[in-house]
Image: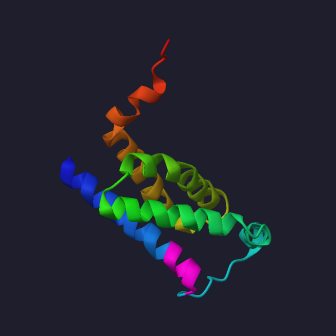
Amino acid sequence: MKIAIIIIRTLIGLLFLFTSISFFLNLTPEPVSTGNFKAFQVGLVASTYLMPLAKTIELLCGLSFVTGRFVTLANIAILPVTINILLINFFLTPQNMPIALFVFLGNIFLIYSHWENYKGLFVAKG
């Protein structure tokens, strides 16, 4: 189980690092989008803050996953991003679902594997 955790954590971390660094440094050309996804993407870009915010979270969580530090925090911080990646791909670009499923299910697996660290959040004190 420990080896699986390290492999999944590292793969997801490298994926987040690649996509965020590519975004900030314009290393890869933007893929051509069409239809509803293009309209959605135009809205994201027009917001001016949402994509840099998401990519900054991806960068920080990717660093956390690759280094193995603050993984418990990174799992929760990246969860809304992975849910959005899954839903955007499900509704707008189903051809990318395998990667979206890997990222989402990998995040859920990492949360499950660190569940002892989260138990305190769900216990009523008083």
User: What's the image's color scheme?
Assistant: rainbow
Residue drawn at 41 percent across, 27 percent down: 120
Q: Is residue 58 left or right of residue 34?
A: left
Foreground: 72 or 10? 72
Residue drawn at 45 percent across, 58 percent down: 103
When asked about the image quadrant of residue 86, the answer is bottom right
Query: Up-down: is 109 above or below 68?
Result: above
What number of labels is visible? 0
In the rendered image, residue 24 lying in the magenta stretch gets the answer: yes
Foreground: 103 or 13? 13
Foreground: 47 or 90? 47
Q: Position of residue 93 (x, y in %)?
A: 62, 66
Q: Is residue 15 visible?
A: yes
Q: Position of residue 68 (x, y in %)?
A: 30, 57
Foreground: 56 or 13? 56
Q: Which residues are magenta?
A: 20-26
Query: Up-down: is 108 above or below 95?
Result: above
Q: Is residue 98 visible?
A: no
Residue drawn at 33 percent across, 55 percent down: 69
> What residue occupies the far top of the structure in this picture?
126
Give the prevailing secondary structure in the magenta stretch: helix
Residue drawn at 38 percent across, 70 percent down: 14
Query: Up-down: is 105 above or below 16?
Result: above
Q: Position of residue 40 (x, y in %)?
A: 75, 66
In the rendered image, residue 99 lying in the magenta stretch gets the answer: no
Q: Position of residue 38 (x, y in %)?
A: 74, 73
